[in-house]
Amino acid sequence: MYKQYKTLGQMAREAYDEGHRLVAPLVGFPGVVLTGSNIKMAQQNYGEHFKAIKCLVEKYRPDLAFPLMDLALEANALGRYTIFPKHDSATVPKEPFDFRELERLPEVNIAFDARVNSYVETVKLMNLGLPPNVLRGAYVTGPYSLAGLIIGSDEAAIATMLQPEEFTRLCEFVAETIQEYVRLLIAAGAQVICVLEPSAVMLGPAQFKQYSADYVGHILSSCKYSGINTIYHTCGNTLHVIQAMVESGVDGISLDSEDVGVRLPEVAKRVPEKVAIIGNINPARTMLYGSSREVEEKVSDLLEAMDPYPNFILSTGCDLPQETPPENIHAFMQTGRAHRCRKTT
């Protein structure tokens, strides 16, 4: 029997009934600038990592805080060659993969991986050291994206058509790996698990459901049992897979910006009110390169457009670059906090 919990949709509705919105930009990397650290150190030293997140929370007061986004984490834990730049997020270069490696990989327990444990310890510190009114989030890589990191993104797309049985075995394996990581994060105190699935945007609706959404639904079943909120995050124009994302059973969907074709008011007409819609200010064009006045205008326009929809949470289309001007993040937060909903229902 699932544990009862207040969903993100319910939280968004409560804020809406009080006349305001939850404000939760995806912001992690700018924290290393605040602490004088760097991305490499923060991603490998959980003390530095927590300092960066704590500084962000103290400075901007978001309703939800995440560690630094790291799509290479699980692939690295599974032995894939990973590059760790000093001032950029870790990357996994393409290298040859033989599906026969699946005979050995299940023997690897990622719970003993140093970088996985660094992120788990960061979440523990967030659970202990952040204000109680700030939700503690954590990211995991989605099944299709993780499979693509292991065998190569082009190879993954080809395998769905030419080697569906082998690719399905790989997806089943990575789904179990992700679920193990999810359990570690929940035990550490995570209250929200966000599945990052950027590569799956290239799939058609049926393939997205087969190689991503079905596995996400399985992975997150343990979250619902534990009373943990779940978010499905995708990049690019994902209008063709919105239904599959929602049907996976997540509590919220986090979507990319209008500049790639995602108009949230149109999305809201297709999404049940119980599912939170999270987004979608452009992290680069608006937040990184725009002026604070432009940020205010974009945020105001989005808030006004979403006024009819109680299940909206103001956020960015993806994680903010570390060079994002602090005054732009302030403008985002202040505009979001100042908005008062003009209810139409």
Image (spheres, helix red, strand yellow):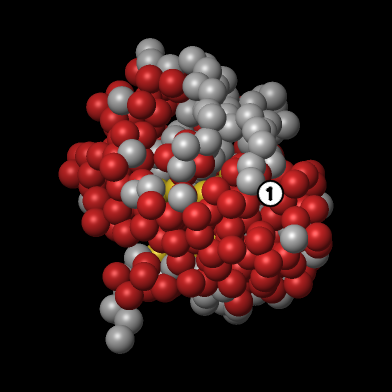
In this view, the residue in front, 128 or 327, is: 128
Q: Is residue 6 left or right of residue 173?
A: left
Up the image or down, 151 lies above or below 20; here it is: above
Q: Residues within 10 Å of mark 1 (few under 14, many from 20)?
A: many
Q: Splitting the image into 4 quarters, where does residue 162 fall?
A: bottom right
The residue at the far bottom in this view is: 1
Residue positioned 43% across, 55% down in the render = 106
Q: x%, y% of residue 225?
A: 32, 75
Q: Report the quarter where the C terminus lies.
A: bottom right
Up the image or down, 322 lies above or below 262; here it is: above
- Identify residue type, mark 1: Ser
The residue at the far left in this view is: 128
Q: Is residue 326 left or right of residue 228?
A: right
Would residue 317 be visible to someone looking at this image?
no
In this view, the residue in front, 222 or 12, is: 222
Q: Is mark 1 on a helix, strand or loop?
A: helix
Residue beneath label 1, please?
199
Residue positioned 61% across, 68% down in the render = 213
Q: x%, y% of residue 60?
A: 40, 35
Residue positioned 68% across, 49% down in the render = 199
Residue positioned 81% across, 62% down in the render = 161
In this view, the residue in front, 49 or 160, is: 160
